[in-house]
């Protein structure tokens, strides 16, 4: 099931895009859920990080699509953002918020079909690696590939990622179980690491670049074996 959001304050443009989406999935046979918003603030107010694809109008009466996209990216790095506008020059601004693509209005089906196929390919590459974390009542979606390590701090989990540091509720055992399929291994009762970022191991310490984490003595062999397997026999 693909979850799609459309944000456009022009009723005719919104209807046309809905029609193109319906036509696409009738032809492809896929399943989808469609959510329509007449303003970017409405989307942000209800945003829970569950949309796979978002078609976002750049010029709206009450909000600017680029600003809305920036707010989305603060919570969700992976959703496929596709801007729609009547002015081609806005396409350049899409790079600042990692937009997947851009469609000129009025949206013609041939153009839409290409963009939609590109968006579905993006979703397929990212969906299995998206981790949802809860932070102060809000949800954030992280790519497992971007998570370097996770540690317990007080009663919270701290996710150290390539995009920054995220604080979340949860337990290290639950995080370890969820991340295990993506080459994560627990070092102690208080931390787990992504083998992708491990640069070395020395006695009771594992290194991830400039970061160093302690290793539980009883877990050392398991960690070394996992590193050997991950690196094809060489640490």
Image (spheres, rainbow, N blue to C red):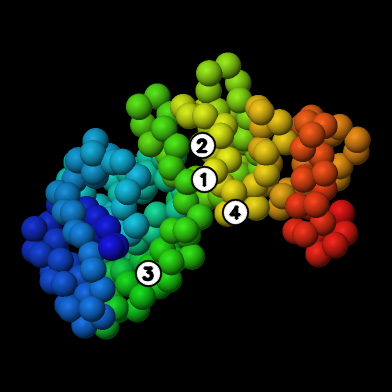
Between discs 3 and 2, the one toward the N terminus: 3
Q: Nearer the viewer, mark 3 or mark 2?
A: 2
Q: Any mark on residue 139, and which?
A: none
Q: Residues within 10 Å of mark 4 (few under 14, many from 20)?
A: some
Where's the C terminus, which quadrant?
bottom right
Q: Is residue 123 left or right of residue 184?
A: left
Q: Secondary structure at mark 1?
A: helix
Mark positioned earlier in the residue sequence (3 or 1):
3
Kindly check if marks 1 and 2 are in contact, taking CB atoms under 8 A apart as contact: yes
Q: Which residue is mark 4?
A: 182
Q: Is residue 230 left or right of residue 69?
A: right
Name the residue: 82% across, 44% down: 221
User: Which type of secondary structure does the marked residue at label 3 adopt?
Assistant: helix
Q: Which residue is mark 3?
A: 120
Disc 2 on helix, strand or loop?
A: helix
Kindly identify which numbered label has been placed on residue 174.
2
Callout in the foreground (4, 2)? 2
Spatial CA distance of label 4 from label 2 is 14 Å
Q: Is residue 57 visible?
A: no
Q: Residues within 10 Å of mark 1 (few under 14, many from 20)?
A: few
142 over 58 or under it: above or below:
above
Residue ID at (56%, 34%)? 173
Q: Can the viewer see residue 175 in this picture?
A: yes
């Amino acid at each position: 099931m693909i979850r799609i959001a459309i944000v456009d304050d022009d009723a005719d443009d919104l209807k046309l895009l809905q029609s193109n989406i319906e036509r696409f999935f009738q032809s492809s046979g896929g399943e989808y859920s469609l959510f329509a918003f007449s303003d970017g603030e409405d989307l942000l107010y209800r945003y829970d990080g569950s949309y796979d694809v978002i078609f976002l109008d750049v010029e709206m009466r009450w909000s600017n699509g680029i600003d809305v996209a920036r707010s989305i990216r603060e919570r969700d790095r992976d959703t496929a953002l596709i801007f729609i506008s009547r002015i081609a020059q806005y396409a350049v601004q899409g790079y600042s918020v990692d937009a997947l693509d851009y469609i000129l209005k009025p949206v013609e089906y041939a153009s839409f079909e290409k963009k939609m196929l590109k968006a579905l390919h993006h979703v397929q590459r990212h969906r299995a690696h998206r981790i949802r974390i809860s932070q102060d009542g809000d949800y954030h979606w992280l790519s497992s590939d971007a998570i370097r390590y996770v540690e317990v701090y007080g009663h919270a989990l701290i996710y150290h990622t390539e995009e920054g540091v995220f604080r979340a509720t949860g337990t290290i055992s639950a995080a370890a179980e969820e991340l295990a399929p993506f080459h994560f291994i627990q070092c102690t009762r208080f931390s787990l690491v992504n083998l992708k970022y491990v640069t070395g191991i020395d006695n009771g310490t594992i290194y991830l670049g400039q970061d160093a984490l302690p290793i539980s003595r009883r877990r050392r062999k398991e960690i070394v074996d996992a590193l050997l397997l991950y690196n094809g026999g060489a640490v």
